[in-house]
Amino acid sequence: MENQIKESKTSTVRGFPRHTKKIMKGNFAASEAAQLCRVDFVPAYPITPQTTIIESIADKVAKGDMDANYVNMDSEHSVFAAAMGAALGGSRVFTATAGQGLFYSHELLHAIAHFRLPVVACNVGRPSIPWNIWSDQTDSLAQRDTGWVHYYGESSQEVLDTIIQSYILAETLDLPVMVVLDAFYQSHTSENIWIPDADLVDEFLPSKKLKGNEIDPGKPKDFGGLVPPEHYGKFNTEYWDDVLKVEDLSEKIARRFESHFGRKYSNVEAVNINKNTKIVLVTISSITTTARGVIKKYPDVGLLKLRLFKPFPKKAVIEALKDLPEDAIIANVERNFLGDNEGAIMQEMQRALYGTNYKMHDFYAGVGGKDVPPETIEKIIFMARNNPDYVNWV
Amino acid sequence: MEPSFDFLIKDEKVFSGALSCRGCGWSLLVRHLASILGEETVYVLPASCFSIISGPYPLNDLKGTIVHTVFAAAPATATGVRAALDRRGREDVPVVVLAGDGSTFDIGLQSMSGAASRGENILYIVNNNGAYMNTGIQTSTATPYGAVTTTNPGAKGFKKTWPKDLMGIIAAHNLPYAATCSLAHLDDFRAKIEKALSIKGFRLLMIDGPCPPGHKTDPADSIQIARLAVETKLFPLMEIEHFDYKINYRPEKFVPVEECMKMQGRFKNVFKPGNEEVLKDIQAHTDNHWKRLEALAAMSEN
């Protein structure tokens, strides 16, 4: 484990004071974030390619670096059930899973969300049967309707930083948050990562305070008993009210994060989208970085990166595209397959841009971990220019 | 004769008006349990009849905290609740799973096994009424051989497989305490609750659960049938501490299994002509199971 994290000799002078620069794999950035957030409870179950997240947390707890209850559960279903119980009891909870594990926990994802519990979980995306352990976002995107807030990290630095921000969002609105990173391209790839000092994080994210809606043995309550039809809607409308607050609050937390830590994030990021743009690539996760590089060669191609995916940041998307000519082509890059014609990104983009005249096309690229090198992005740009089909498999 | 006010339950922790059926074991069971546990207790409930009995929103039938959770993972949810309470310095608050046989024997077996293996400090109560009663009497792996259910139906039909030996399975986990209890032996039941509470770790009590609609019985006969289940050795009263077995009650005289079964409409097809061998098999199985228990108990004494 030690040799996985190499401390860099680089000083902390350039860039980010009160940080240490380390060379670290994405999974270790995630476990580092859990430690920095001072989580109380980590129920765990191994699954590739997430396993090193929970292994490194087990290691941190064993060494005394992390003051948390780490519990080896019997399945991901039990992991999320335990997460639910601990969050009901007022603990700050973290866990990580991937692919089948996330699919298996589906029932609990709904329950955690509808119990309004501020659990934060990392998912390292991979698809289902036939067996495949490589990068794919079908698992998390198939959970987009469970009521969890979903973030996709472009880099492992972004994953670490987003986990820290997620606890503020989760605990402010009583909503669970899923932070997704790419299998292998992030989880097992080393990057330079700036680790904030513990006290810097403590100033931003204080330890969890009880709100009074948790289990209190002295004040018996019933959590989750049978709710008749005439009352059920009340819980949903209250939930809906808070879901509508996510987009603005997420942006506000990102601004506060920027002034505190010095790194800028937003719900979406527009690159080179203006009145001369003819094509906009829409991406999530690490494909974004590849696309960033490629579009430098193409002055008329822009990029829309989605960091917050659920609830879909409709306002930010519309704002990002405000100067885009109506005859421009929006090319959605999908690393997911949800059993429908369009992939998840195109479905959401169409919903957000309903009533506009943009020509939207879908490009399935990189499902099941297939590499998406710059040439693939260039191919998508070429196809987008030359009368593409509505949906294209690249 | 002067009426006696020397009730076992001195301090009632269950409100009147619970939604259980007449003659149901759940309410009696929980009344005794809660009277001993007190109000500062967290009950974790997977889907079961008791999910309904405990009261629809915004009611709570129990003077205590209730956490409703999914069918398959009550012990895992209880694990999280336990950890959170311990973290808050509330190791004194009991965390109790109240489950039926469906979640214990079938859908939640893995979760229970996980919590038992980890030695979670949880008291697990299983009300074994031998079928999925809340959904309307479907066969579970706790359903006795010979019982008719809506999924082993028919004018001549009945379940033709033996129920799972849950106590054997739980004993294999090497637990500090597991026991069976009967609502016809309340002093024994209450003593076992007290004993379970005096021990730290994963503890399990299995109670034979009367269910008039599911067992097709007269609600007035619930306790009498529970008593006959013990007398016929269909439901032996025992304790298991780690690998040591103890039989708590040995019936004075032989009572054939028919005595208990004939009072329950669910076994009516077994009593139809042509099924004489089935009844003999059930008797033989019951006798063998008892013999095995006696052997285990004798071994434990040495």
Image (tube, rainbow, N blue to C red):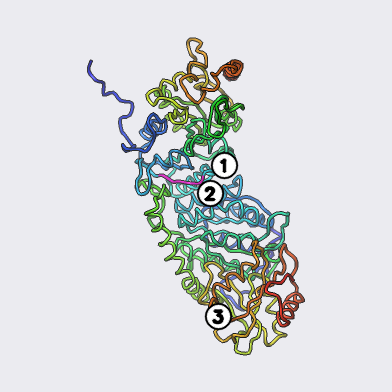
Answer yes or no: do the residues labelled 2 and 1 have beta carbons within 8 Å?
A: yes
| B129 over A180 or under it: above or below | above
Q: Residues within 10 Å of mark 1 (few under 14, many from 20)?
A: many
Q: Is label 3 on the same chain as label 1?
A: no
Q: Residues within 10 Å of mark 2 (few under 14, many from 20)?
A: many
Question: What segment is highlighted magenta in the picture?
Answer: B66-70
SS for dot 1: helix
Mark 2 and mark 3 in contact? Answer it, CB < 8 Å. no
Q: Which mark is residue A356?
A: 3
Tell me the tag on residue B111: 1
| Residue identifier under label 2 | A81
Above/below status of B16 relative to B222: below
Which residue is nearer to you in this view: A264 or A294?
A294
Residue B291 seen in render:
no
Is B21 located above or below residue B146 in the figure?
below
Residue name at image x 50 percent, y 27 percent: B179
> Chain under label 2?
A
Q: Residue furthest left?
A: B2
In front of the other: label 2 or label 3? Answer: 3
